[in-house]
Amino acid sequence: MIDYKGNTIDSDQDPDLLWACKGGGNGNFGVVTELHFKTYPAPQSFSGYRMKFTNLTSDKFVQLIRLWFQATEKLPKEAFSAFVLNGKFLTILFTNFAANQTDFEKTFSSLLPFVSDYKPMKNRNLAAALKNYYGVKEPIYFKNSSAGLYTGIEDIEKGLEDIFAKVVASKGMIYQINTLGGKINEVKASDSAYPHRDINYLSELQAYWDLPSQEEKLTKSFEEIQQLLRNIGNIKQYRNYPDINFPDANNAYFGNNLARLQQLKKKYDPNNLFDYPQVIK
Ligand SMILES: Cc1cc2nc3c(=O)[nH]c(=O)nc-3n(C[C@H](O)[C@H](O)[C@H](O)COP(=O)(O)OP(=O)(O)OC[C@H]3O[C@@H](n4cnc5c(N)ncnc54)[C@H](O)[C@@H]3O)c2cc1C
């Protein structure tokens, strides 16, 4: 990393730097010019199970989200799941790159009686299978941000009906919850600046619109859902899904590691040469 004086700092000589850059880099300390990554063999095969649920009511939404939280409580390390509410339309995805699917499929059997469309894709070549998840290539209008990191359904239980009502009332709004866990929480929290390793779920809000004139209304609904989540106690946020409107943003992103990151800011950039609204001060 090149620091504010133009000196090169190498994490081999300065382990604090590597600790900080694993989750707390974000232009806070200097300009990173080189990173070395360990690589791992890619999995041989990949299975994806996509379920669609249509015409949801509030009650059905609450029932399905409860079943989903139960199903994902103890996912195997090779698996992932996403719960994606888009208006009255819900998509649930499970993926798994382990070879044996038989036991895994039992994980989500409680959801299958309610599906209107179910597409299992089993043991496919990984590179070919991932093409199913490519996004659109043309530019689109959108806003995306973290909507809280949850230990379980108890963190959002009080707000479920209101979240559903607001998403349904705001065309283009998506409320999504992704599973974490697995290898992420095998690393000790103290080994990197990323503070949320013990948390099981990461949620995000997305809003998509076609015309600039639609932005204001959707952004307002977006902020109302964020406020609703805060009101029921969700203040932790994921730094890679930032939002300029998060109150006390650095506390939300870095939690218990903020104090150490602030000390390192003093060490690497004492005059705050690297500065922007959510920089670590
Ligand atoms: C459509 C979309 C989907 C996404 N999906 C995911 C996802 O599934 N999972 C996930 O984790 N994230 C996701 N993200 C977030 C994404 O991972 C982060 O936005 C990413 O870290 C940005 O990296 P960048 O290099 O593009 O960024 P930038 O926006 O350029 O930089 C990100 C931060 O790093 C700092 N920075 C950039 N370069 C340097 C440097 N050389 N030295 C020091 N600091 C530097 C910047 O100041 C900034 O704070 C998504 C983002 C988008 C837009």
Image (cartoon, rainbow, N blue to C red):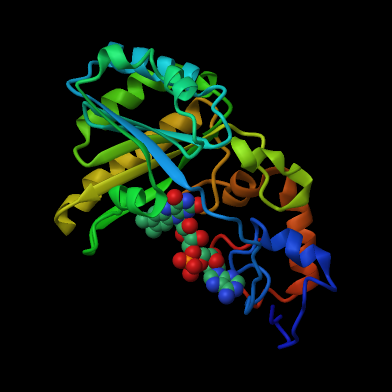
Q: Can residue 120 be seen by looking at this rendering?
A: yes
Residue 276's spot in the image, x, y percent?
Answer: 55, 68
Query: In front here: 117 or 5?
Result: 117
Q: Is residue 46 left or right of residue 274?
A: left
Query: In front here: 193 or 267?
Result: 193
Q: Is residue 46 left or right of residue 183?
A: left
Q: Residue at 25% across / 19% down in the picture?
A: 115
**Where, quadrant-wise, is the C terminus in this rendering?**
bottom right
Q: Residue at 42% across / 47% down in the picture?
A: 145
Q: Is residue 39 left or right of residue 105?
A: right
Q: Can residue 179 be seen by looking at this rendering?
A: no
Give the residue furthest to the bottom.
6
- Residue 274: name its quadrant: bottom right
Q: Is residue 54 left or right of residue 159?
A: left
Residue 15's spot in the image, x, y percent?
Answer: 82, 65
Q: Is residue 29 above or below residue 20?
A: below
The number of discs equals: 0
Give the residue furthest to the right.
13
Q: Is residue 114 above or below residue 244?
A: above
Q: Is residue 34 above or below residue 170?
A: below
Q: Residue at 45% across / 31% down in the picture?
A: 229
Residue 74's spot in the image, x, y percent?
Answer: 57, 23
Query: In front here: 224 or 68?
Result: 68
**Where, quadrant-wise, is the N terminus in this rendering?**
bottom right
Residue 139's spot in the image, x, y percent?
Answer: 23, 64
Q: Residue at 76% across / 73% down in the picture?
A: 268
- Residue 26: name its quadrant: bottom right
